[in-house]
Amino acid sequence: MEFSVKNGSVEKQRTGCLVVGVYEPRRLSSAAEQLDKLSDGYLSNLLRKGDLEGKAGQTLLLHSVPNVPADRILLVGCGKERELTERQYKQITQKSIQVLNETGTTEAVSFLTELHVKGRSAYWNVRFAIEAIQESQYSYNEFKSIKPETKRELRRVIFNVAHRKDLAEAERALKQGSAIALGVSAAKNVANCPPNVCNPAYLTKLATALAEQYETISTTIVDEKQMAELGMNAYLAVSRGSENPAYLSVIEYKNHPNPDAKPIVLVGKGLTFDSGGISIKPAEAMDEMKYDMGGAASVYGTMKALAEMNLPLNVIGVLAGCENMPDGNAYRPGDILTTMNGLTVEVLNTDAEGRLVLCDTLTYVERFEPEVVVDVATLTGACMIALGSHNSGLMSTHNTVAHDLLNAAEQADDKAWRLPLGEEYQEQLKSNFADLANIGGRLGGAITAGQFLSNFTKKYPWAHLDIAGTAWKSGAAKGATGRPVPLLSQYLINKASI
Ligand code: BES
Ligand code: MN
Ligand code: ZN
């Protein structure tokens, strides 16, 4: 689908369809009001007859409205004017596209971007419209021999903004919204890909392809031999039970006016399948452990969005690819591993593998002298229990980093909620035989996992995002969400504009 923005008057648009809002109860938005005048009260007449109350998501398609040059008008219920939230705005936008797709129109001009969403500007309306539309148009059919038929006449949507002075911001929203939507769908594609195809080597191919696609990006791969030389024994221990070798993909984006500027480093957990290893998981929904590389997928998607936006930053995205399998050669409960930074870890559960892969990766990235490191991981079931599937869990030893990320989450409408860290939690990680145990007991499981990681991040400001609940959806609508690409992209946009 093609998008553009403009500032035109609703009466003059010669197009397949005008999309305008109606609030509850039967109240015309300003664009609808103008059309009503032009058509001598055609719209208000219809509303009076009770054809549209204005409830959120209601629609009414009109043809050949008197005096209106556009072929059609789509009236869209927006709910109560004062209660128009981001969520509702996205839903009515998606609904209108769904209805438009069922008409014969190839082009539409939407005036929904003129609506007032609490606390949001034209920039956000345009950006959220693009993100929401791409979200609703997404499907993953790579492995279906018969691709589901999608009748999609609609090819072009033009978003109208109310004021000429909003155009520049709307153009920026168009560019950034399209880049983020592209990053989200790239992340979804990787994450939805089955684990017999998407293995650690597959992640390296994607990372390498980015370098071919963008001049600002160069990619290097760290293989198991190099990991062994570096002493990344915790990472390697997790990989040992798998026939698919582990790879770390390092995606370097260099576009800061000062080439020596310290990089922002994003680290993604890339367990292309997590069976639990010897501490094997129960069979139910185990297929969903293909999504245990959701962190890496989101880092990949964010690097793509970043390169599309061409932000003036230095950013390094690291995909920590690995597979956790049971095997005669697999690591076991009781094993003591010496990590890259020298700390020893007693393995009490081989299913707490993410922190083992990440701890060595977090030590590895010290070499970049990062300005800040953010790791993203489907780390704990406990985080899903704590926050459900709406908020990602945020943990950080640095208040400014935490605030910047929470702020970006709020702005991007990709929610996150902070959980604490601290020495009390560190005590739960005590081992009788090593410096640390890899699990901290049932209580505060998301936090003890974050706390574990904090032992390896002392050389730089750091935050951890636990996306176990947000990276994918289960059930009938099973599929990757592409989160937290919007959050991370927004964090980078903000970094670029200070
Ligand atoms: N990848 C899982 C976490 C997970 C589980 C994410 C279910 C989403 C849904 C992680 O590697 C894991 O298995 N964590 C264990 C840790 C435990 C053994 C301390 C968990 O959460 O059960
Ligand atoms: Mn696990
Ligand atoms: Zn895992």
Image: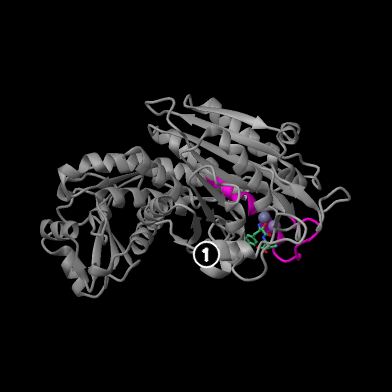
Residue 191, image x, y percentages = 60, 48
Image quadrant of ligand 2 equals bottom right
Q: Is residue 197 above or below residue 46?
A: above
Magenta stretch: residue 285 in it? yes
Q: Look at the image and tell me whether residue 456 can be seen.
A: yes
Q: In the image, what residue type sits under mark 1?
A: Ser
The residue sitting at 60% across, 55% down in the picture is 378
Displayed quadrant of residue 240: top right
Q: Nearer the viewer, residue 435 or 195?
A: 435
Q: Position of residue 151 (x, y in %)?
A: 48, 50
Residue that mark 1 sits on: 389
Q: Is residue 181 found left or right of 96 in the rendered image?
A: right
The way the protein has been coloured in the rendering is one colour
Q: Give the image location of residue 179, x and y in percent.
A: 42, 40
* Quarter occupied by the N terminus: top left
Q: Nearer the viewer, residue 277 or 22?
A: 277
Question: Going by the image, does 77 lie left or right of 432?
Answer: left
* Horizontal side of residue 73 vs 413, given as left or right: left
Asked whether residue 145 is in view, the answer is no
Residue 342 place in picture, x, y as percent: 69, 44
Q: Nearer the viewer, residue 171 or 452?
A: 452
Q: Is residue 139 magenta?
A: no
Q: Is residue 67 above or below residue 443?
A: above
Magenta stretch, residue numbers? 275-298
